[in-house]
Each structure stands twice: as C-alpha cells, then as structure tokens.
Amino acid sequence: MGAHILVVEDEEKLARFVELELLHEGYEVSKAANGREALDTAVAGHFDLILLDIMLPGLNGLEVLRRLQQYNPTPVILLTARDAVMDKVAGLDAGAVDYITKPFAIEELLARIRVALKLHGKISSAAASQRKEEDVYRWGKLTLSEKRHQVIYDGHEINLTNREFQMLETLLKNQDIVLSRDMLLDKVCGFDYVGETNVVDVYIRFLRSKIDEVFGVKMIQTVRGVGYVIKSGT
Ligand code: CA
C-alpha cells in the first residue's frame, strides 16, 4: 500500500482532480473540505502527508496547521494563492515542510510530494534510531521533547512557535555554554539568513514572556555583550 495522503481543499473539482492523480500514482487518499473536518480527520487517522489549502471556509489552513503541529508530526505541504507571500512565510514558520502555489502543474505537486515523503521518512527513521534519552532536554521543572515537539513546565504545556522552540532547544542542548546572537541566529533562521541579529532578542523576549514570567523563574540569562545562556544549576 502506498503512502496515505490527506487532501484538504474546499474547491471540490480541484480536490477530486488531485485525488484521482494521487490514486493513479498508487497513493491512498482521504479528503476534507474544511478546517474542522481536516483537524478531525488528521487526528483520527494516520497520514504520511497532508496537502493543506490555506484559503478554507471557517478555520483557515494556517490555523489548522498550527493546531496540528501541537501533537501531530505529519509533514504538511501548503497550497497557497499566487501572491500570498505572508501566508508562505507564516506557513513555513508554523512548520509546513513545503508549499506550492496555485495554479500548479500536477507533475510539480507529485514531485514535491515524493521529496517530502522521502525526507520525512529519513528523518523519522533517524530519530527512531537515536537513543531515547537524547530526545528529551530538562531544566528544573521544564522538559523539552524533540520528537514530540513539546515543552512542558511542571505539568503545563507551553505553546511555542517553531522558531521559539528551536531557540529554546539550542539553549537547552548547550546548557552552561554562552551562545552568541550570531550562533543562535544560525541555528534558528539558517546560516544563510541575512537579517538583524536582534531578531534573536525578540525570540528570547517571547520565550521569557511564555516561561520565565509565567512560572516566576529566571531560565534564560543575558550575558552582556556576548549572548544568552541557560545555566544548569539555577
Ligand atoms: Ca480554497
């Protein structure tokens, strides 16, 4: 049996067209025509990939993506309108692996699906072969699980964006090592990012507002003129 793909698209003709093409390629296909249905279907079933239209009635695709990312590691390819640059950025930030602009050639969609399935397959088998302890980082009452993409403080789940999560993970992995803004920027935005390093300060502020301020701790410390550190003994 081929990979199982969930197609979330409210335009019935397009959804049907994509479904037929995917079936023809040997994939198993389920469909959802709005955001709520997409969430329910995705949570109830096991999918290898989700094709998610952004412009959906009711709950839009980005909102569906954000909610899915909280407990579902299924790779998502977004279907976006031609000029919706902010949607693409927001979508990738929220954890989509790729996006494709409408109208698209079916060959291009099929190629991107193959790449996403291949990449995700590799990543999950690599993650599975790692020792379990390597997957979890701790600081005081805080636990970060890489595989589940989940941060819990004293039983309370903390909702972080992808970049906040990566920033926190980098600091937790390197406890007691002061990381410069440049290093953190590389980790979180990619080494080819050409922006301001004060982006890092912004994410640190978000993290502090979600963790330090809520739980009354001082987790992330500023080292003036150098960067940031989480100290293991504090
Ligand atoms: Ca639509």
Image (tube, helix red, strand yellow):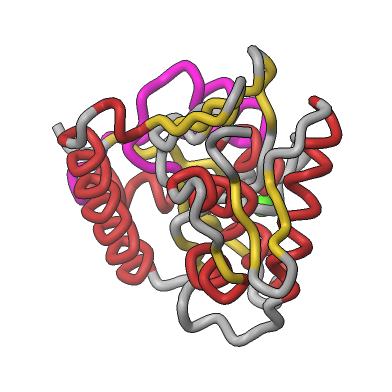
Would residue 137 be found to the left or right of residue 214 on screen? left
Number of on-image labels? 0
On the image, the x and y values in percent for residue 11 come to 62, 49
Could you tell me which quadrant the N terminus lies in? top left
Could you tell me which quadrant the C terminus lies in? top right
Indicate whether 93 appears above or below 61.
below
Task: Tell which of 198 and 229 is nearer to you.
Answer: 229
Q: Residue furthest front?
A: 233
Magenta stretch: includes residue 26: yes
Which residue shows up at 55% across the image and 60% down it?
178
Indicate whether 125 appears above or below 95.
above
Q: Name the quadrant containing residue 23.
A: top left
Q: Name the quadrant containing residue 70.
A: top right
Which residue shows up at 49% across the image and 46% down it?
175
Q: Name the quadrant containing residue 137.
A: top left
Indicate whether 4 appears above or below 117.
above
Would residue 164 be found to the left or right of residue 96 on screen? right
On the image, the x and y values in percent for residue 201 come to 75, 64
On the image, the x and y values in percent for residue 221 come to 70, 51
Would residue 3 be found to the left or right of residue 191 on screen? left
Q: Residue furthest bottom?
A: 194
Which residue shows up at 25% across the image and 39% down it?
127
Residue 223 visible in the current orientation: yes
On the image, the x and y values in percent for residue 34 come to 66, 35
Magenta stretch: includes residue 19: no
The magenta segment: 25-50
Residue 101 visible in the current orientation: no
